[in-house]
Amino acid sequence: MLASMMKSIIEYDRCSVVICDLNHTIIYMNPAAVIRYAKRGGCSLIGKSLLECHNPKSNEIIKKVVAWFEKSEKNNMIYTAHNDKENKDVYMVALRDGNGKLIGYYEKHEYRNKETAGMYDFSRSLV
């Protein structure tokens, strides 16, 4: 039951979520990510290397972040970018198993725009 709930949280998040294993293989994209990266292949990116989607400098940084995650169980989230056009911050977040072992990572987007929907507005869906 908990696994279904956790998956639902990610599935209905309006922000893109791209999950990679330690080989940098994209193993999951939520619907928002599939739409966001449609021009790059959308869901066909699943199973491909994230490193194929970035330039050499970005790949070097991604590898450094993963190495930092591996150094300590306390190293779990790092700020990677701000996008002025979309008013959002981007982070890389470590994924760990129940024993604290690093098993992957994901990209997290946090938008800074004020919500435009009215509070408890049942006339529209936000997802």
Image (cartoon, grey):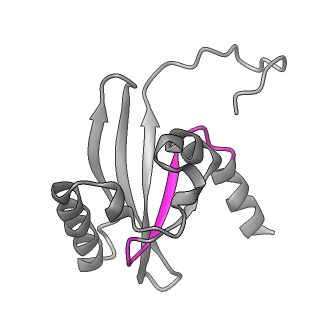
Q: Quadrant of the N terminus?
A: bottom right
Which of the pair 97/108 is nearer the observer?
108
| Main secondary structure of the magenta stretch | loop
User: With respect to residue 18, does 127 lie above or below?
Assistant: above
The residue drawn where x is 43% and y is 81% is 100
Residue 21 locus on image (x, y percent)? 45, 74
Q: The magenta stretch spans which residues?
A: 12-24
User: In the rendered structure, does residue 18 fall within the stretch colored magenta?
Assistant: yes
In percent of width and height, residue 124 lies at 79, 20
103 vs 51, nearest the viewer: 51
Position of 83 relative to 66 (above/below): above
Taking depth in this image into account, of 75 and 24 the one nearest to the observer is: 24
Residue 109 higher or lower than 73, as above or below: above
Tell me where residue 117 appears, x and y as whole percent: 67, 16
Give left or right: position of 93 versus 64: right
* Residue at (40, 25) in percent of width and height: 86
Report the residue at 54% width, 43% height from top. Answer: 38
- Which image quarter is the C terminus in? top right
Judge whether residue 69 is colored magenta. Answer: no
The picture places residue 27, in percent across and down from the top left corner, at 54, 68
Tell me if 120 is positioned left or right of 57 in this view: right
* 21 on left or right of 12: left
